[in-house]
Image (spheres, rainbow, N blue to C red):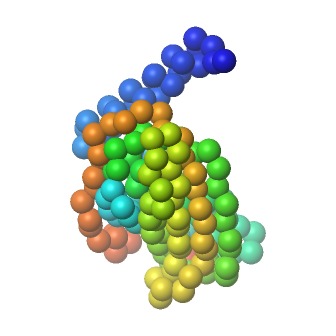
């Protein structure tokens, strides 16, 4: 059984997300911006996001760190679920890294496999700018509460992020 402090923390987190939604932000996950990622669009069935690759997201081998790729997958899938009207938290995830991400952008597309009252399952795929499949995965979410869907209108990725250089520059 949860404590009062845990319940209060859940309410506070819910209010933060709802405040960000009310402000009309493109993302309800400001953390991803610190890793040079963005949500390109989110709807009740699918969503898409991108990592703009720079030195900050590389592993010691010079390819995109798997943890950054999982962060993008989690955020894109989470935006997908909230666009379907469910405020959620991640319960579990699995990933299959198929080839190294040695590119300037990593795209992530999510698709809801099951939208339940309490549990939702979302499949993700990540590709490079040439369409090569880099990673597949599945994320499972727990619904905190139902909310108005937070749809994000499509937009094209930025030509270049303003702050950080691409590899090879």
Q: Residue 162 is drawn in which quadrant?
A: bottom left
Q: Is residue 17 left or right of residue 97?
A: left
Q: Is residue 139 left or right of residue 41?
A: right
Compared to 119, does 168 lie above or below? below
Residue at x 33%, y 69% (from the top left corner): 158
Q: Nearer the viewer, residue 116 or 89?
A: 116
Point out residue 110 in the picture as x, y percentages from the top left corner.
46, 65
Would you place residue 145 above or below residue 81 in this image? Answer: above
The N terminus is located in which quarter?
top right
Residue 5 position, x and y percent, is 59, 14
- The structure residue drawn at horizontal position 48% and vertical position 69%, both measured from the top left corner, is 108
Tell me if 60 is positioned left or right of 107 in this view: right
Percent across and percent down for residue 159 are 34, 74
Q: Nearer the viewer, residue 54 or 87?
A: 87
Q: Quadrant of residue 48?
A: bottom left
- Residue 33 appears in the rendering: no
**Residue that appears at 68% across and 73% down:** 97
The answer, for residue 12, to whether it is visible in the render is: yes
Residue depicted at x 46% and y 47%: 116
Placement of 5 over or under 64, stated as above or below: above
Choose top left, top right, bottom left or bottom right for residue 54.
bottom right
């Amino acid at each position: 059984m949860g404590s009062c402090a845990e319940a209060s923390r859940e309410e506070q987190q819910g209010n933060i997300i709802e405040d960000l939604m009310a402000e009309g932000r493109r993302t309800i996950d400001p953390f991803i911006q610190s890793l040079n990622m963005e949500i390109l669009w989110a709807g009740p069935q699918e969503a898409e996001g991108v990592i703009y690759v720079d030195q900050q997201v590389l592993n010691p081998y010079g390819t995109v760190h798997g943890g950054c790729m999982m962060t993008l997958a989690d955020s894109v899938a989470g935006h997908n679920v909230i666009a379907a009207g469910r405020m959620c938290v991640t319960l579990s995830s699995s990933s299959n890294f198929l080839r190294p991400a040695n590119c300037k952008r990593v795209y992530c597309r999510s698709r809801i496999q099951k939208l339940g009252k309490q549990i939702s399952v979302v499949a993700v795929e990540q590709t490079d700018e040439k369409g090569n499949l880099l990673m597949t995965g599945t994320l499972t979410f727990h619904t905190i509460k139902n909310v108005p869907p937070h749809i994000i209108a499509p937009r094209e990725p930025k030509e270049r992020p303003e702050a950080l250089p691409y590899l090879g520059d």
